[in-house]
Amino acid sequence: MELLKVNGHLNKRNLALSILIPVIGGSISGWIANKNAQEKYKKLQQPPFSPPGIVFPIVWTALYTTMGVAKYRVDQKTKSTEKDSSPAIPLYDLQLGLNFLWSFLFFRWGLRGTALVEISLMLACIALTAYEFQQVDKTAGALMIPYVGWVAFALGLNYAVWKLNK
């Protein structure tokens, strides 16, 4: 519970919003992007390190939750310290938008090469977000590390699928 408190306070409404926006947004964008795309995806050649499909919704839900907690912590710290000039939240919003877009590029539209370029940009934005979060709140920065790792793995997976299915 201490993880959720910032400066000794817990703002349940802001915490819920910070978590629900990426979780619900990711679920909706993933559902729309994947609608009728899975049959085509299953026919693609996969690299040997590709995890089973059930792993993805579990991992993404956990990552969206932890990034939401991180965003909440930074939001609360910047509000309480008047650090509104920090680029942390705009970077967070940008990487989240890129995250939602990637599913459409890769699954819905089958633009795997474009998705590869986009996920590279997204990874850079996530790393910058993690850095900026670290500057505001060390715990928030640490909460972003699994996300950085997973997206780096996803970039490798995207590359392999694109390369195997040119």
Image (tube, rainbow, N blue to C red):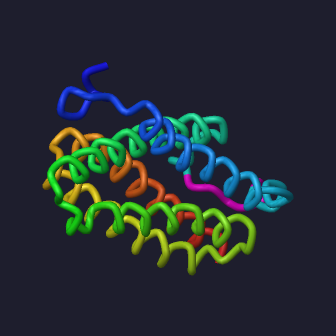
Q: Could you say where residue 32 lies in the image, as x and y percent from the top left? A: 76, 58
Image position of 9 (left or right of 157):
left
Q: Could you say where residue 110 lies in the image, as x and y percent from the top left? A: 71, 73
Q: How many marks?
A: 0
Residue drawn at x 29%, y 41% is 143
Residue drawn at x 54%, y 38% is 61
The answer to whether 92 is drawn above or below residue 63 in the figure is: below
| Membership of 77 in magenta stretch | no
Of residues 119 and 87, the one drawn nearer to the viewer in this rendering: 87
Q: Residue furthest top?
A: 1
The quarter of the picture where residue 2 lies is top left
Report the magenta residues as a range: 42-47
Residue drawn at x 55%, y 49% is 21
Q: Could you say where residue 71 lies in the image, as x and y percent from the top left? A: 35, 48
Majority secondary structure of magenta residues: loop
The answer to whether 70 is drawn above or below residue 161 in the figure is: above
Q: Quadrant of the C terminus?
A: bottom right
Image position of 21 (left or right of 91):
right
Of residues 160 and 89, the one drawn nearer to the viewer in this rendering: 89
